[in-house]
Amino acid sequence: MNSAYSKIFALFLCFLFLISCSPAVKENKPTIILTNGHIWTGRDSASFVQALAITGNTITQTGTTETILALADKETKIIDLHGKLVTAGFNDAHIHFLSGSMGLSEVELSSTLTLEEAIATALAFIQQNQNKEWVTGRGWQYTFFKSGLPDHNTMKALDINKPIFIKAYDGHSAYANKKALSLARVTSSTKFNGFGELVKDKNGIPTGALKEDAMSLVGDLVPPPSYEDKLNALRKGLALAASLGITTAQNANGTEVEVALFKELLDSGELTMRYAAAFSVDDKTTAEQIERYTTIKDSIGSDNSFLRADAVKFMLDGVIESHSAAMLKPYEDALPNAKDAEGSLSMPVANYQELVKILDQKGFRIYTHAIGDLGVREALNAYEKAMAENKSVDRRHRI
């Protein structure tokens, strides 16, 4: 290299060095700074700092209040915590966010501890919402009832001239009052042969209790909320989640509409929680639907930190309380000659295994509701079979 080129090269290196050191090169200043706090870093149980800086969606620096404040400019929002605790946000790994959000405007019995309290709460709601065509809600406990399920006798206070349809706390059973059954034309001659049960008394008269898919006998009559109703409900749900420090959630059921709702909130800047959607599938799900779900999954992608739609949800059995979870042996307290004394699977095993294989191959994370030991065994068998045949790795399937 001749002397002229050597001088030019040396000057170029000096220029690069000066740029790297120059205060004139403006770095991204913090968007938010938290000061005077008790901020847990997560490194170990005793790792706390006073302050932190956030730029966009990233924590960029932690340290003392003095050192972090020195990073601020006139546009930085500064929040004095006055010694309050800060931790990472909570993750809800199994939630039904839309139905839970809709429930904020319905009868909410999850916090009630007795049947009497549940009835009183429901009656108070009815009194305060007399314009509602249907009274819907969720939250009663199986332990409120001697038989494990409500009936028209135990719920006689709700025998009013307005349809009432309230699900159990787990969403696997529901109670419909006489008015609701009448509107649904459910009588002693009504038969239900799917997954679940229309519960009848010893005389063959419906008790008002409905298990699993039999809930649709009445539930399908409940006027559906509009798209705008759902959007407003999600806004309420997101505000509640934020107030409780819930910053991420994996939904455990869902539809294309739910994904569209969250996409709209994302695009409008209103999505304050990282949300992983799941599509509900069963043995009635068509190949066309699976392709549609795959297209939506791929269109959203995995790079979007606030929204993903790469999971599917199966319901393979029910729950212990109503004896609908699929067991290897009959329930010890099953009545003599009880229908499905071991519970039952919601679909043939071969159908489930084939769908799991297809969805695993297409890159979905698979959630399976399986509570009974038979249900859990079949879920594990299906996952193992699919991953072996597809030669898939690093799948995060779950039960």
Image (cartoon, rainbow, N blue to C red):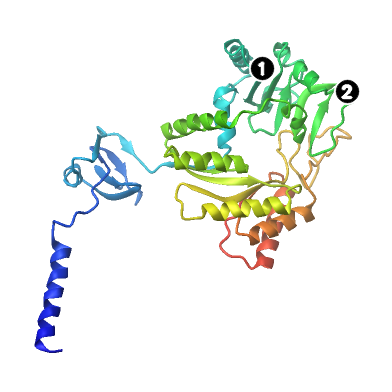
Relative to 339, does residue 186 appear above or below in the rendering?
above
Looking at the picture, tell me which residue is in the foreground, 100 or 14: 14
Q: Amino acid at mark 2?
A: Ser
Judged by depth in the image, the label closer to the viewer, 2 or 1, is 1
Considering the numbered disc 1 on the image, is that residue within a helix, a strand or a loop? loop
Q: Cα distance, mark 2 to mark 1?
A: 25 Å
Picture coordinates of residue 201 (x, y %)? 85, 23
Q: Is residue 75 above or below residue 389?
A: above
Q: Residues within 10 Å of mark 1 (few under 14, many from 20)?
A: few
The disc at residue 125 is none
In the rendered image, is residue 340 in sight?
yes
Q: Amino acid at mark 1?
A: Glu
**Image point (80%, 18%), residue name:** 182
* Residue 354 falls in image quadrant: bottom right
> Can residue 366 be seen at all in this image of the molecule?
no
Q: Which residue is mark 1?
A: 133
Q: Is residue 358 above or below residue 61?
A: below
On screen, residue 260 versus residue 238, left or right, reads right
> Mark 2 sits on what residue?
188
Q: Left or right? Give the position of 326 relative to 167.
A: right
179 relative to 103, above or below = above
x%, y% of residue 340? 83, 39
Residue occupying image coordinates x 74% and y 31%: 215
**Does residue 218 appear to the left or right of 20 in the view shown?**
right
